[in-house]
């Protein structure tokens, strides 16, 4: 069987992590009856006896190059290598017929409503265009695949609502964490994410302006000049001594910070936030926006409080002086990829 894994979009951050994680699983679990073909653009992967890599660097030159490749060149590759099934790791299916396709869907931005961002807000304009143009194309493509795989039941339900009669299954990701229990005093909260408009740092700033009795620290993991939105957050934070901009932190450093800080999370939308799993492993107190994704992932964790707006967050921060560590909790550690491979092999046999 020839299985092609398509992720020409992967370049950095979460998308790259998904590609590398799946590639490493295939590499460590070779199947003599399966030939794997990985299609990438800028990402280089090593070949093995049963893993073949096809790099299409020209795809990144422009959207026209990308479209030409998807609608023309990919069809040629299908015939040349006699692919039996397609696994797309880039949230959308490919425009080919006659070959079963599965899509690993992990971009929750596509699940936001059309007018979630304002075209007239310069910080939201790019997301508004993305939401208005890319999301409809993505949803259209998903109607033409055979299987969609999500990371949470929240995303599964949202897709089923948008795409009637489409087969969607949930396979949670594995988050490797080491349980660590300590009694360190909580010095404040850390919000480990990039400066992106839908992460809603403004909610935290608004809450701190309303909360005059909170003395703990709030750590943002970016620098004040990282991008235009970071500059905006820096301006809004002037005069608030609680907020510290500590720059990008690698995972090892973040885990050290969980020994002293709790987790605060205010994002509009997420697929599967890794910080939840990491904070739980340390028994850290979590203050999270009251969203469906958070309720699902944190359902069995006791040391968590939810807020819907800045007033509720301000009240929680005022009471957080008594925040303490709870029992460490380990989330799903079983690799999802065995089930993913089994699922795509199944649709190839149908």
Image: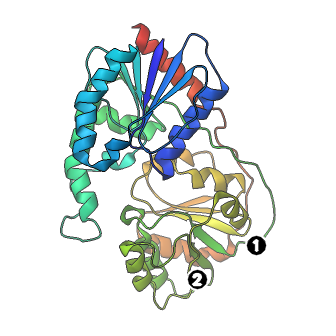
Position of 306 compared to 113: left or right?
right
Observer able to see residue 276: yes
Position in image of residue 290 (x %, y %): 45, 57
Residue closest to the far right: 182
Looking at the figure, which quarter contains the C terminus?
Answer: top left
- How many numbered marks does the figure carry? 2
Which residue is painted at 46% across and 15% down in the image? 2
Which residue is painted at 59% across and 55% down in the image? 275
Tell me the number on the disc at residue 66. none
Position of 132 compared to 324: left or right?
left
Identify the image quadrant of residue 146.
top left
Q: Which residue is identified by label 2?
A: 214
Observer-nearest of 18 and 291: 18
Observer-nearest of 167 and 294: 167
Position of 110 compared to 189: left or right?
left
Position in image of residue 168 (x %, y %): 39, 27
Q: Which residue is identified by label 1?
A: 185
Identify the image quadrant of residue 320.
bottom right
Q: Is mark 1 on a helix, strand or loop?
A: loop
Position in image of residue 18 (x %, y %): 52, 40
Observer able to see residue 116: no
Which residue is painted at 40% across and 68% down in the image? 309
Residue closest to the far top: 349
Which residue is painted at 44% across and 71% down in the image? 201
Q: Work out whether mark 2 precedes mark 1 in sequence or the reverse, and give the earlier one.
A: 1
Residue closest to the far bottom: 239
Q: Residues within 10 Å of mark 2 (few under 14, many from 20)?
A: some
Q: Is mark 2 on a helix, strand or loop?
A: loop
Residue 148 vertical placement versus 297 (above, below): above
Position in image of residue 226 (x %, y %): 45, 73
């Amino acid at each position: 069987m020839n299985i092609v894994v398509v992720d020409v979009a992967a370049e950095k951050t979460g998308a790259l992590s998904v590609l590398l994680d799946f590639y490493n699983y295939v590499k460590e679990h070779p199947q003599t009856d399966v030939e794997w073909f990985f299609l990438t653009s800028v990402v280089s992967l090593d070949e093995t006896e049963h893993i073949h890599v096809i790099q299409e660097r020209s795809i990144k030159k422009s959207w026209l190059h990308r479209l030409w490749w998807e609608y023309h060149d990919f069809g040629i590759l299908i015939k040349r290598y006699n692919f039996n099934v397609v696994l797309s790791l880039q949230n959308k299916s490919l425009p080919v017929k006659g070959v079963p396709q599965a899509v690993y869907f992990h971009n929750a931005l596509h699940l936001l409503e059309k007018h979630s961002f304002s075209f007239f807000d310069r910080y939201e304009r790019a997301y508004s265009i993305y939401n208005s143009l890319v999301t409809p194309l993505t949803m259209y493509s998903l109607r033409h695949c055979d299987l969609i795989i999500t990371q949470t039941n929240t995303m599964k339900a949202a897709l089923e609502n948008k795409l009637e009669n489409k087969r969607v299954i949930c396979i949670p990701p594995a988050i490797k964490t080491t349980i660590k229990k300590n009694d360190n005093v909580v010095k404040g909260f850390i919000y480990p994410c990039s400066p992106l408009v839908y992460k809603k740092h403004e909610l935290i700033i608004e809450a701190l302006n309303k909360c005059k009795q909170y003395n703990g620290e709030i750590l943002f993991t970016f620098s004040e000049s990282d991008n235009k939105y970071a500059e905006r957050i820096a301006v809004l934070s002037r005069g608030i001594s609680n907020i510290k901009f500590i720059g990008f932190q690698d995972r090892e450093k973040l885990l050290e910070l969980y020994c002293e800080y709790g987790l605060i999370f205010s994002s509009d939308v997420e697929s599967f936030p890794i910080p939840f799993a990491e904070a739980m492993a340390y028994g850290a107190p979590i203050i999270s926006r009251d969203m469906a994704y958070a309720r699902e992932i944190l359902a069995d964790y006791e040391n968590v409080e939810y807020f819907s707006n800045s007033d509720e967050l301000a009240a929680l921060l005022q009471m957080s002086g008594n925040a303490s560590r709870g029992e460490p909790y380990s989330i799903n550690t079983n690799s999802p990829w065995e089930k993913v491979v089994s699922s795509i092999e199944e649709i190839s046999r149908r």
